[in-house]
Image (cartoon, rainbow, N blue to C red):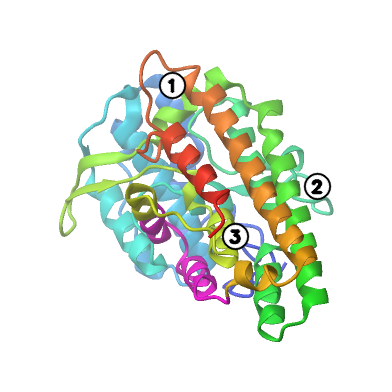
Amino acid sequence: MKPYPDTSFASGFLPGQAPLTHLPKAYEAWDTAARHLPDYLTKGNARKRLEKLPDFAHQQLSTAAELERAMLVLSFLAHAYVCEGGASSGHLAAVIAVPWVAIANRLGRVPIISHASLVLHNWRLLKEDAPLTADNLKALLQFTHQADESWFYMATVEVEFSGRKLPGLLLDLHKYILVEDEPYVAKCLQQLQETIEAMHQSLNRMRIGCRPEVFYHEIRPYLASFRDIHYEGVADPLRSYHGGSAAQSSLLQSIDSALGIMHPEARSRAYLKEMLNYMPPAHAAFIKRLAKGPDVQAFCRRDALLDSAYSACIQAVMSLRNEHLKIVAEYILSQASGPALGTGGTNPVDFLKQLRNDTGKRR
């Protein structure tokens, strides 16, 4: 894998090398606390333990890999602190809040747990010479002792790995349309369809190692949105952010942008736009670049075979979104005793149905 920073997208939206498993020795107390979070939370003493941590001298961190490890550690500690015991603390201690906000600013993201930390930078390979599949991966950090939690994150890493060719394919698709090379456009669309179908197969594997009841009752509470949380010691301390959400993955937003799939409903469009702030800036910039065209749908209409290939890609995206809907129904709706919001703060079924229906509409 290529070294950081990875702006080539050679590994898709995954980092160009395996994430760091620890910070420099000066931050050992922080790595130790992050590793022992399941114990602290089980004993109900996480807030007390975390408040005793030493100052986090974030200025000493220089590489992108170190900043991502720091963001991962601080995100887990912050959510453990705020969400311990199932009721929000309403505040976040300055010892965590101050460095977390600083690191998030340096990375160009917001200080909340998000897909970029939870998934993209939270894995290690079990066998170095084997691919990034859920059964060959282990989460670096967890909130619980449950193997289900690691599988939940690692199955999502596998989806990202299955989609690793997407950025290059989408760039090639636009390039060949601009030079009107129809055979290569058809080839790109075929490969795009196959890639989306591989992502679908990986998403199906979520059920193998993560039980819905464990996800809902033991894991999900720690991935919640923050509402009016007082970040002690920072400017503009009262803050609200969306929690972890699949909409923070750059995969589907890239496909939508490249293929011209529009989301005209105001709330859905606004939420997707806001999620760009939760992504690494290079990923968000890539999505915005794709949105500038060319018009893939209009080009493909010129030829029946191209139009059929384009439609097959759209159908593959719809099937993937339908699968996501099924998982939401199993892992959230069927577990809830009443109305349930997603960890990202939206009504997950209404939101995902809207996106799926938008996908099927041709201009």
Q: Secondary structure at mark 1?
A: helix
286 is within the stretch colored magenta = yes
- Helix, strand or loop for disc 3: helix
Image position of 294 (left or right of 173): left
Q: Which residue is mark 3?
A: 255
Frontmost residue, 348 versus 179: 179
Of pointers 3 and 2, the one earlier in the residue sequence: 2
Q: In the rendered image, which quarter is residue 339 located in?
A: top left
As drawn, 64 above or below 267: below
Is the N terminus in the top left, top right, bottom left or bottom right quadrant? bottom right
Q: Residue furthest bottom?
A: 179
Q: Earlier in the sequence, mark 1 or mark 3?
A: 1
**Can residue 136 be seen in this snapshot?**
yes
Instruction: Indicate left or right for 339 with 283 as reference.
Output: left
Query: Residue under circle 2?
Result: 127
Question: Can you give x and y, in whole percent of width and height, for residue 139 in the image?
Answer: 61, 41
**Residue 102 location (% of width, % of height):** 31, 62
- Main SS category, magenta section: helix
Three-letter residue code for mark 1: Thr
Cα distance in 3D space between marks 1 and 2: 30 Å
The residue under label 1 is 42
**Residue nearer the viewer, 314 or 93:** 314
Look at the image and say whether residue 270 sits in the magenta stretch: no
Instruction: Characterize the local packing of mark 2: few (<14), some (14-19) or many (20 or more) Cα atoms within 10 angstroms.
Output: few
Say if 45 sits above or below 237 in the image. above
Q: In the rendering, at what x and y percent does residue 202 appear? A: 72, 41
**C-alpha separation, residue under disc 1 versus residue under disc 3:** 41 Å
> Which residue type does callout 2 highlight?
Lys
